[in-house]
Amino acid sequence: MTSVARWDVLELPVAGPTGVHFRHASGATAYAESFQSEGGWLVRFSPDLEGEWSGSSGLEFTCTPGTSRGPVRRFGTALRWADGTPYYPLTTSWFGRPDQWAAARPAIAASPFNRVRLAFSEIIEDQVRDLLTAGIVADVSLPLDEATIRATVNRLSAYRNVTWCLSPTSTPQATDVRRLAELIAELDPSHHLISMHEATDPGPPWLTHLSVRLENLRGVSSLRRDYAKPVFVDACGYEGNGTTPDTSLRPEEMLTRIWEGTVRGAYVTHGEWYVDTPWSAGGSRPTGVAAQRLRLLREVLDELPDGVEPIDDYRDAPTLAVPGSYYLQYLGEHQFPDRTFSLPEGVYDVDVLDVWNHSVRRTRENVTDTLTVRLPGTQYQAIQIRRRS
């Protein structure tokens, strides 16, 4: 009997344009439509339940335990992998030509980014597969074209590392957005995330999260509150020397925007636009400063405890916390000499993170009621506090 690991890809040939109904032994069902490949018509399906499955084509297969965490799911205003593990994306944008991908692929795999925004192209499946191998999520930009959406979703939805983003080239009708977003949801048995970049109304339920353009990252706090959805700032500007304000940010500004938005509970996309080597427009590797300095943020995100949320206890600086046990505060352009925290009695590891210079100064402190953290009095500092006992 055929077997496939949980959240891997089952591929089967079919006679023509059709769909296959899948049924699990528990009674759960799923439906996948076919797409045309070079060798004929195929159906792809990614089972999310272990055990015995059958298909309307007469196929029977077993879903075995896998090692992957599955696709990304919305969890309130946060994100988790399907197995329940928290997911903290750090994204870069790459909108190059197909012939530029081979050079960019190893740079992405070696970077601190675990999510990449991609323009739709004829090699989009190759890109999705390459990123899956590297453990990176592919945010696929889809045009507002029904035929393209239908073919792309049928082809790619079985890959667990996909998310969808409708990317209009002009102001669309709200009815078109709703119809196409609902079409994606109907065609996608894996239920991947769906957004629309710069949606005029990001609140409707057929959009699982916000994809916004935002230069002042303080604004993400109100977006999270008003829409109660995950907020992706997929365009905050580009480090570079381009001819427009948004393509000529200093690296310090790029870095601080990403940290500011992240510690406010959003997910902020990196972009780079140096005229000679524009990474986001198809460069072979990031040549700017921010990409390398984001490795410290990647390390912090990888160690965040489950359940961190923005808190209002320290209104003059954004703070993520699990109150009483964990705090991450970003000070940005402020040059504070110290910061005082009210904490339960206990022993804490205290890290002063120099975001710009990628350095960490760690101490262990015994706290009775308050903790004052001494700072170097320079910009781009963050404080991380973790309770030990």
Image (tube, grey):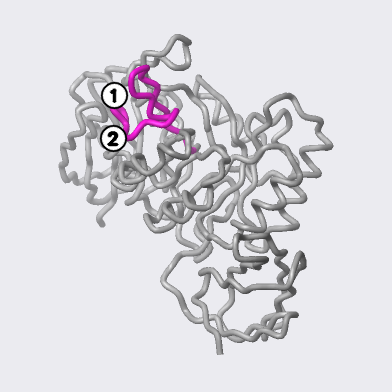
Image quadrant in which you'd find residue 300:
top left
In the rendered structure, find residue 166 and report the number of the disc placed on it: none
Quadrant in which the N terminus is drawn: bottom right
Q: Is residue 275 magenta?
A: yes
CA distance for labels 2 and 1:
10 Å
Q: Amino acid at mark 2?
A: Ile
The residue stretch that appears in magenta: 267-290
Q: List x then y, in percent, for residue 146.
A: 76, 44
User: For residue 199, which quarter of the picture?
Assistant: top right
Whether residue 339 can be seen here: no
Can you name the residue that lies furthest to the front here?
39
Front one among 141 and 259: 141
Are there few (<14), some (14-19), or many (20+) residues within 10 Å of tag 1?
A: many
Instruction: Name the residue tied to disc 1.
Output: 380
Q: Are marks 2 and 1 in contact (CB under 8 Å)?
A: no
Tally the marks: 2
Position of the C terminus by quadrant: bottom left
Residue drawn at (62%, 69%) of the image: 45
Q: Is residue 183 left or right of residue 161?
A: right
Q: Secondary structure at mark 2?
A: strand
Image x and y of residue 313, in percent: 45, 34
| Above-or-below relation of 178 to 45 | above
Q: Which residue is mark 2?
A: 383
Spot occupied by residue 79 in the image (x, y as percentages of width and height): 52, 51
Quarter of the figure with residue 169 = top right
- Observer-nearest residue: 223 or 149? 149
